[in-house]
Amino acid sequence: MINAIAKRKSIRSFTDRKVEPEKVEALLRAAMRAPSGMNGQPWE
């Protein structure tokens, strides 16, 4: 985990390439499973 944190990058420029809907849905499902402060679940 420490290696992943140490190697992360901040991206400042992006392409116009579209993101596949399946990837967007997978990311949203992962975010919905992440813990929230005091179980606030602000995504709901």
Image: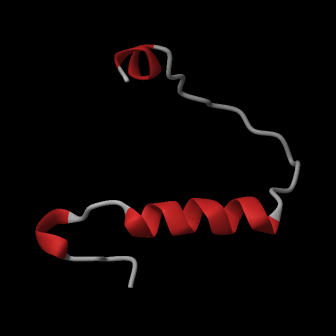
Residue at 79% across / 68% down in the picture?
21
Whether residue 11 sits left or right of residue 38 in the image: it is right
Residue at 42% across / 14% down in the picture?
3
Which of these two is toward me, 3 or 15? 3
Expressed as whole percent of the image width and height from the top left, the position of residue 36 reads 24, 65
Residue lying at the far bottom in this picture: please name it: 44
Quarter of the image with the N terminus in it: top left
Residue lying at the far left in this picture: please name it: 38
Whether residue 40 sits left or right of residue 32 in the image: it is left
Which of these two is toward me, 9 or 31? 31
Quarter of the image with the C terminus in it: bottom left
Q: Look at the picture and state if 36 lies above or below 8.
A: below
Whether residue 26 sits left or right of residue 10 in the image: it is right
Residue lying at the far right in this picture: please name it: 17
Q: Look at the picture and state if 27 lies above or below 10.
A: below
Residue at 28% across / 77% down in the picture?
41
Q: Quadrant of residue 42?
A: bottom left
